[in-house]
Structure formats: C-alpha cells, structure tokens
Amino acid sequence: MLDTEHGDTAPPKDEPRGCLFALSQPPLMIFLAVIGCLLLMASLHDLLML
C-alpha cells in the first residue's frame, strides 16, 4: 500500500529546503518589499529632487 500519512507535497526530512522556499514566506517578502520601496523612493528623490 502507499504511505499517504505525510502528504505528497512535503519534502523528505533529509532534503534541505532551498532559497525558493525561503522567498515564499510572507514575512520575508513583506520585509523585502519595504526595503525595495525605501530604496526606490531614495533613488527617485536623488534623481528628481536634487
């Protein structure tokens, strides 16, 4: 019989999760979006206002 206790999408326990798994986490993406917006606003300020 097939072992269906853990589900099909769970990675094996000995296999490390990669960078794409880390980037899919909402808190990290919110943090990166805030930092990106701050950098964008600073660069636009330097280009347009100074």
Image (spheres, rainbow, N blue to C red):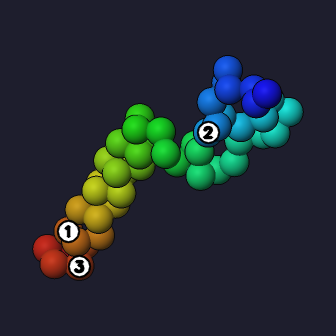
Taking the image as drawn, is residue 31 in sight? no
Q: Residue at x 63, y 30 (%)?
A: 7
- Is the residue marked by circle 3 packed among few (<14), some (14-19), or many (20+) residues within 10 Å? few
The amino acid type, in three-letter code, at marker 3 is: Leu
**Element type where label 1 sits in the image:** helix
Between discs 1 and 2, the one toward the N terminus: 2
Please tell me which residue lies in front, 10 or 19.
10
Q: Residue furthest front?
A: 1
Give the Cα distance between marks 1 and 2: 45 Å
Tag 3 residue: 47
| SS assignment at label 3 | helix
Q: Position of residue 3 (x, y in %)?
A: 75, 26
User: In the rendered structure, which amino acid carries the disc numbered 2?
Assistant: Thr
**Is 43 or 37 nearer to us in this picture?**
37
Residue that carries the numbered disc 1 in the rendered image: 45
Foreground mark, 1 or 2, reads 2
Residue at figure coordinates x 32%, y 47% from the top left? 34
Q: Label 2: which residue?
A: 9
Judge from the rendering whether residue 12 lies leftward or rightward of residue 36; answer left or right.
right
Marker disc for residue 17: none
Q: Nearer the viewer, residue 23 or 47?
A: 23
What residue lies at 71% left-to-right and 37% top-to-bottom? 11
Q: Is residue 1 left or right of residue 50?
A: right
Which label's residue is closer to the chain start, 3 or 2?
2
Mark 3 and mark 2: Cα distance apart in space? 47 Å
Give the residue drawn at x 29%, y 70%: 43
SS label for mark 2: loop
